[in-house]
Image: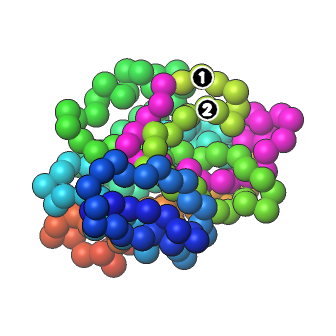
Amino acid sequence: MILKVQGGQLMREDRVGMQEQFWVKMNGEQLPLFLKEMSQASFRETEAIAFVCIGTDRSTGDALGPLVGSALKEAGYPFVIGTLEAPCDASNMVVRLSEIPQGSVVIAIDACLGQKQSVGLYQISNQPLLPGKSVGKRLPPVGDYTIAAMVNADGPKQYAILQTTSLHRVLAMAREVTDAIKHAFPIKGIQNDMMIQI
């Protein structure tokens, strides 16, 4: 089965071959439905999923990844790299990536800067995340799939923008990502409606 994005919708095609690459922009209401369809079409039940939640708790805008990672860890997800207690950021990324269990499907989660009209939206892809790209850093690509949360508008001073990003927006988006993951990739034995407060 192949996933194809057409008109912003995830379409399934029953044909053999390489999966088409996609980058899809969506809002928080669409996120859980899209991830659920993606999980049903692309993941086998036996596959281990590792979540690499990139960012740091030392910058408001860049704290989204560790906030999501902490919530997933508290919810009982076994393979989470990057939390508030132990972030995965530019200073330790190569070492932290070596913690990914062999053979896991990796979903990378990070905050990013985007166009003004895209703030509050998400970009989802079946391609690796390029962490630090919006602030001009060159770090190794991460993951098989990407969830990038556009927490603020891009501008000439990216570090200052991330430092002054609304904490309210980052917390709200971290909750949306966490809830969407819990909807799309539930842990057996844990009810989907269990909410972890961030």
Which residue is rendered at x = 26% and y = 55% of the image? 16
Which residue is rendered at x = 44% and y = 35% of the image? 142
Q: Secondary structure at mark 2?
A: loop
- Considering only order in the chain, which callout, 2 or 1, is on the residue closer to the N terminus? 2
Residue range in magenta is 140-163
> Residue 132: x and y, percent?
61, 32
Residue 67 in sight from this viewpoint? no
Task: Please name the amino acid that badge 2 sits on.
Answer: Gly
Viewer-nearest residue: 28 or 195: 28
The reply to whether callout 1 and callout 2 are in contact (CB within 8 Å) is: yes
Q: Secondary structure at mark 1?
A: loop
180 relative to 152, above or below: below
Q: Mark 2: give few (<14), some (14-19) or many (20+) Cα within 10 Å.
A: many
Viewer-nearest residue: 38 or 17: 17
Res 29 quadrant in image: bottom right
Viewer-nearest residue: 137 or 1: 1
* Drawn side of residue 132 relative to residue 16, left or right: right
> Residue 197: x and y, percent?
45, 66
Color encoding of the figure: rainbow
Which residue is rendered at x = 60% and y = 61% of the image? 25
CA gap between label 1 and label 2 equals: 7 Å
> Residue 138: x and y, percent?
60, 22
Can residue 161 be found in the magenta stretch? yes
Numbered badge on residue 27 = none
Viewer-nearest residue: 3 or 188: 3
Q: Where is mark 2, residue-wise?
A: 132
Res 193 quadrant in image: bottom left
Numbered badge on residue 138 = 1
Can residue 157 be found in the magenta stretch? yes
